Amino acid sequence: MHVQMIPYLEIRRRRCDCCDRTANLAAKLLLMDGRALLGDLELCGTCAAAFGSLAQETPGLVREEGPPSGRPVPGTAGGED
């Protein structure tokens, strides 16, 4: 898995997915597994800078984890709803 940060070229004033404040968004963070998109976050400047520094300091930070009990996660294939 890897993380890709894409800066916005146009000003977008919306709610930041990280800090939940309404602000000008600076970037979109994409969480990818190979070519598959797993998720994305729209980030304000402060949160984008924090995620950017984390990604540079600890490139192996993003990893897949299962539930602590080893049982399937509800709402996924094989799990209870």
Image (cartoon, rainbow, N blue to C red):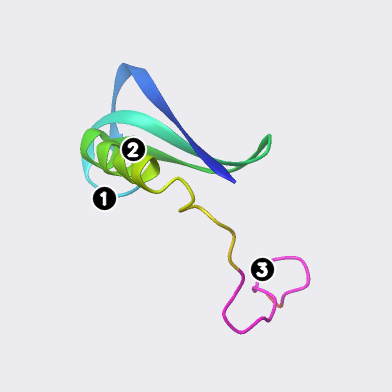
Q: Outermost residue, top direction?
A: 9
Residue stretch rendered in magenta on the structure: 66-79
Q: Point out which mark residue 75 bears.
A: 3
Real-space CA distance between mark 3 and mark 2, rounded to the nearest whole angstrom: 31 Å
The total of numbered circles placed on residues is: 3
Task: Give the side of residue 53 with respect to residue 3, left or right.
Answer: left
| Discs 3/2, front | 2
Real-space CA distance between mark 1 and mark 3, rounded to the nearest whole angstrom: 26 Å
Q: Point out which mark residue 52 bears.
A: 2
| Residue 12 image-quadrant placement | top left
Which kind of residue does numbered mark 1 sit on? Cys
Give the SS element for disc 3. loop
Q: Earlier in the sequence, mark 1 or mark 3?
A: 1
Q: Earlier in the sequence, mark 1 or mark 2?
A: 1
Q: Residue at x 40, y 49 (%)?
A: 58
Question: Per the image, is 78 magenta?
Answer: yes
Q: Are marks 3 and 2 in contact (CB under 8 Å)?
A: no
Quadrant, the C terminus: bottom right
Camera sees residue 16: no
| Residue 80 image-quadrant placement | bottom right
Q: Label 1, on which residue?
A: 19
Which kind of residue does numbered mark 3 sit on? Gly
- Residue 76 pos. (x, y %): 70, 66
